[in-house]
Image (cartoon, grey):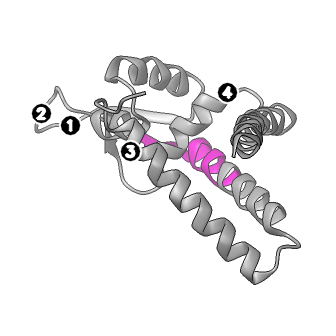
Amino acid sequence: MENSINAINELLVGIFNDILEIEQNSLNAGMLNELSVTEIHTIDAIGVNSARTMSEVASDLNITIGTLTTAITNLVKKGYVDRKRTEEDRRLVLIQLSMKGKLAFRIHRKFHRDMVKETINGLSEIEEKVLVSALKKLSTFFESKCFNSDVKK
């Protein structure tokens, strides 16, 4: 049991770090080299559909509106995000991706699609189903830890 715990811990930490490094290297090597991983994830959270409020995006990213404001200011300066106040309530700020931001969104989504395709390449259908099932359980566990501050360590 202890060997499994150590192996799983090393794998999870390694995978997490590898994904961040691969993602940053991909950004640096491509046409999105002026963006950080945090900025591309902000772009991803805004999405390509309709304009969203700062509160909605901050909630999706699990960050404060103040932290998001700083990120959005930088993304506006770089031309990836448009920011406007509504006519009905001038306090309400809406953000949406510019054309440049939508392109970045699509490139980032393709990066993730390609990464997942490469990850499952060579797996049998059964192995793929087991992987999905295990990742769902892992995701449910982590979500319960994120949203339950009463969890004992």
Q: Nearer the viewer, residue 72 or 118?
A: 118
Using the image, tell me which numbered label, if any, was put on residue 144: 3
Label 3 or label 1, whichever comes before in sequence order: 1
Q: Is residue 90 above or below residue 22?
A: above
- Asked if the residues shown at circle 4 and circle 3 are in contact, with their CB atoms under 8 angstroms apart, the answer is no
Q: For mark 2, what is the residue? A: 89
Who's the residue at 66% across and 31% down the image?
37
**Three-letter code, disc 2:** Asp
- Asked if the residues shown at circle 2 and circle 1 are in contact, with their CB atoms under 8 angstroms apart, the answer is yes
User: Which is more foreground, mark 4 or mark 1?
Assistant: 4
User: Which is more foreground, mark 2 or mark 3?
Assistant: 3
Q: For mark 1, what is the residue? A: 86
Quadrant housing the C terminus: top left
- Asked if the residues shown at circle 2 and circle 3 are in contact, with their CB atoms under 8 angstroms apart, the answer is no
SS at badge 3: helix
SS at badge 1: loop
